[in-house]
Amino acid sequence: MASSSQHVFFERLRRQSLRARRQMIRSGELLTEEEFRQRRPISTKQLLHSLASGSIFSVEVEGAQYYPALLANPEQDYRRLATICRILWPAEPHSRLHFLTARNAALGGMTPLEAMRNDESYRRLLVKARGWASEWSRTLVEVRIGECLDSDAVLPLACTAVTEIDPRISIWRRAFDALESAGNVQPDGPYPKAAAVTVFISRSAAGQAGVTREMRLDILVEKGVAHAGVVVAGFPRSDLPAVRVHKSDDVVEVALKVIRQTSKRASQR
């Protein structure tokens, strides 16, 4: 009965959302690609590039893509608008549109579009946008004890770490960010020591069920050296440079040292 009620509730929300989007098309708040390009002269190539980078976004209505008219308003600073749109990329398009047009207490009651008009409020907007966008994507790190010899095997869990961070940031940086903050890691230590550690790194998006497994990190410790390999679905295993560890390091510290070193190398490329 509860399941049926939930279905009715979400179906009602879906219909309300669809009616609202249809009204936005009728009122000119959402434009076809042709209408959008008439208002904001831009080539097809430039539009595709802007869509790919997140500088411009479209909203799907009944299988067709429409563009927010506010993104073609010549009174807006397109450079600042593009910057904010790129920051908002982790959120789904309709939520991005709502964010841009809703009044915000953190901006002194202004909308983000209004806040772009002067330097001080624009700086506040950048901070607000980054915080808001980070809530739309979570990176989950599981540190497990033992060697993963079978993909179906369930290894003992040492800890789980979670962080809300832009998914476009390097997976190594995201994993490090999750593990380095004690407030993000559960349960608290102390953790055991082990010669084999397996780390699973996954990502979840707000409003979507389940998680997406991004990577598995296999770590074997021998004579004070951690040897690690990366396993990603659809790709051959890739070995990482060895990392020195201390005999007192527990499984979480070993994982953190490997991830920290790899993140540092990745940022130097």
Image (cartoon, rainbow, N blue to C red):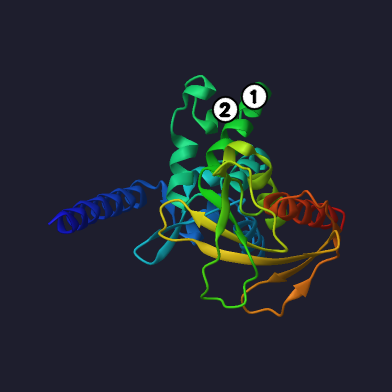
Residue at the outermost left position: 1
- The residue under the point 53% across, 54% down is 57
* Mark 1 burial class by Cα count in 10 Å: few <14, some 14-19, many 20+: few
List x then y, in percent, for residue 68: 47, 49
Residue carrying label 2: 115
List x then y, in percent, for residue 45: 66, 65
- The residue under the point 61% across, 44% down is 87
How many marks are shown on the rendered structure?
A: 2
**Label drawn at residue 118:** 1
Side (left or right) of 262 relative to 93 = right
- Of 229 and 55, which appears nearest the observer? 229
Q: Secondary structure at mark 1?
A: loop
List x then y, in percent, for residue 120: 66, 22
Dot 2 amino acid type: Ala
Mark 2 touching mark 1, by CB under 8 A? yes
Q: Taking the image as drawn, is residue 74 in sight?
A: no
